[in-house]
Structure formats: structure tokens, C-alpha cells
Image: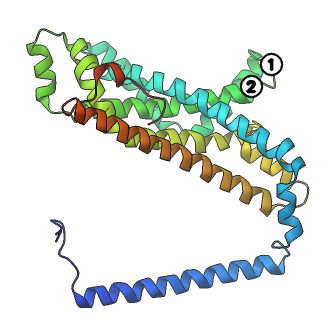
Amino acid sequence: MSTSVLFDAPGPKARRRHLILTILSALVLAGLVYVALSRLQERGELEAAKWTAMFTRQSWEFYFIPGIISTLRSAAVAVVLALVFGFVFGMGRLSQHRAVRWVSGIVVEFFRGVPVLIMMIAFFYFLALRGVFAPETNPFVAVVAALTLYNGAVIAELVRSGVGSLPAGQGEAGLSIGLTPGQTLRAIQLPQAITAMLPALVGQLVVILKDSALGAIITYPELLRQARNLAAGGNTLQPLVVAALIFIVLNFSLTTFAGYLERRINRRGKVAGGAAPVDEAGPQPAGGV
């Protein structure tokens, strides 16, 4: 029989109270859903014709599929660049050189503090004024740059905190066998930290995928933008619901894959004696909020 060290197991009265509260909450939720569906029915939003229009070849060929491709393309590029940015500046924050730590800390804290949408808009107008890229490329570059800098800064902090959470003996063991601090960090501490911070890292990668929807503000033709374009034809609710369901499927798929990856790394770590193999535990393109 399991017990909790934080609170006592509920007794008969507490369990009865919890059951009553659960039933009341379910009834309130069911009532709200009924009211919402009734309002939608009154406005004709639940008519079959409006929903079947979302599953025509035209809707998917010209709106949803191009939107999915654009979303995945920007997210994939941003994930790779954010991982590189995060690990470079995360290790910079762990450097033995004060100047490197200081510069890395300023960069990380600055980009962590600026909202993603503001960075997207700033990059979009800067690129448009400078004419660095073709006009149709500016939204993509602005989305990727903003997602990379913000999420890369968060990943850098995850790397720093992940290494900092390891027992001090890990670093001391590396130094005792003649490794330099940098070699100890790369060969011993960082592989273990990656395994420890993998759930948080995966959560951040899901954030990248979701935040790509902000590109709709700067005309990037991602999934949300394409759904809004389809909604301009008259059906406002249905395209947005379909887009939301697609986002849920994409995020769930990424989270499921990350869970599989985490279990696989943990199994390998147990086989190797509790630590992930150094040659297989580098930065992985799946893995954080």
C-alpha cells in the first residue's frame, strides 16, 4: 500500500466529498457544453454542409496541406537552429572564462525576455526595409529567427541548469582522471544532463511548433494563416477547429516520439551502468517549457 510523504491519504468523508465535487464539476461542464452547442446550433454552425466542406479535396490541397508543410518547415528549421544556439550558449554559460560566461548570460537573458511575437514583427520589418531576401521569403526568415533566438535561449538555460543539477562528484571524477574542465563537461556531464533534461527539452520543442502559428500575424502561410484564408469564404468556425485538431495531432505525435526516445535512452543508460553512452547522447532533435 503506497503512502504519500506530502499529505495523508483521504478518509471516507474526504473521498465522499471528492466524489460529490467531481460529479458537480462534471454536471457544470456538461451544462456549459450544452449551452455552447445550443448557441452554435442556433447560428447554423453545426450544419453538416459546413463541416463536410472542410474535407473536400480543394480545402486540403490548397489550404490545409500547404499550411501543414509551411508549419513543419519553419518548426523543423527553428528546432535545429535553436538546439545549436541553446547548446552553444548553454555551454558558454558554463565556461571557465568569465568573459564568455558574461556575454553568454547577457545574450540568453535578453532573448528570453523578449516576446516571440515582438521579435517576429521586428525581424519582418527589418528584413523588408533592408531588402536582404525576396519579399515572399521575409516572413519565413522572420518566423525562424524569432523562434530560434527565444527558444534557443530557453534551451541554453535548460543546459546550464541540467549540468548544474548533477552531483559534484561527476565533475570531480573527470578532473581526477586528468580531463580538463571542458573535456569533463563535454564527455561526462553534458551527456547525463541531456538525459535528465529531456522531458523539459521536448516540451520546449512542442512550444516551437505551437508558436509557429504566430507567423500568421506577419503573413507567413502556416496552418493558422491558411485556415483563416479558408474561413474568409464564410465558414469561420470550421477551418479553425480543423486547424486546432491538426495542431493537437502534430504536438501529440512529437510528444509520443519524445517519450519513446526518452525510454530508449533510459534503457541504454541502465545497460551501461546508469549513464547514457557518451557517443550516443549528443544533442537530439527531439526532446522542452
Q: From the viewer's side, name the closer residue of 15 and 150.
A: 15
Q: Up-down: is 180 above or below 192?
A: above
When the figure is inspected, residue 130 is found, relative to residue 276, above or below; the finding is above
For label 1, the SS is loop
**Residue identified by numbered label 2:** 138
Residue 125, quarter of the rendered image: top right
* Residue occupying the point 56% across, 80% down: 29
Q: Residue at x 72, y 78 (%)?
A: 37
Are the residues at dot 1 and dot 2 in contact (C-beta closer than 8 Å)? yes
Which label was assigned to residue 202? none
- Amino acid on which disc 2 is placed: Asn
Distance in Å between CA atoms under marks 1 and 2? 7 Å
Q: Is residue 150 visible?
A: yes
Q: Where is residue 214 drawn, in percent x and y?
A: 66, 42
Outermost residue toward the front in this view: 271
**Toward the viewer: 267 or 282?**
267
Q: Give the residue drawn at x 55%, y 46%.
A: 253
Give the farthest residue toward the left. 176
All told, the count of numbered labels is 2
Q: Amino acid at mark 1?
A: Ala
| Colouring chosen for the image of the structure | rainbow
Residue 117 picture location, percent across and down? 62, 40
Residue 288 in view here: no
**Quadrant where the C terminus lies?**
top left
**Dot 2: element:** helix
Residue annotated with mark 1: 134
Where residue 68 appears, x then y in whole percent?
72, 41
Q: Is residue 244 left or right of residue 278?
A: right
Q: Specify the quadrant of the image occupied by residue 226.
A: top right
Q: Nearer the viewer, residue 116 or 255?
A: 255
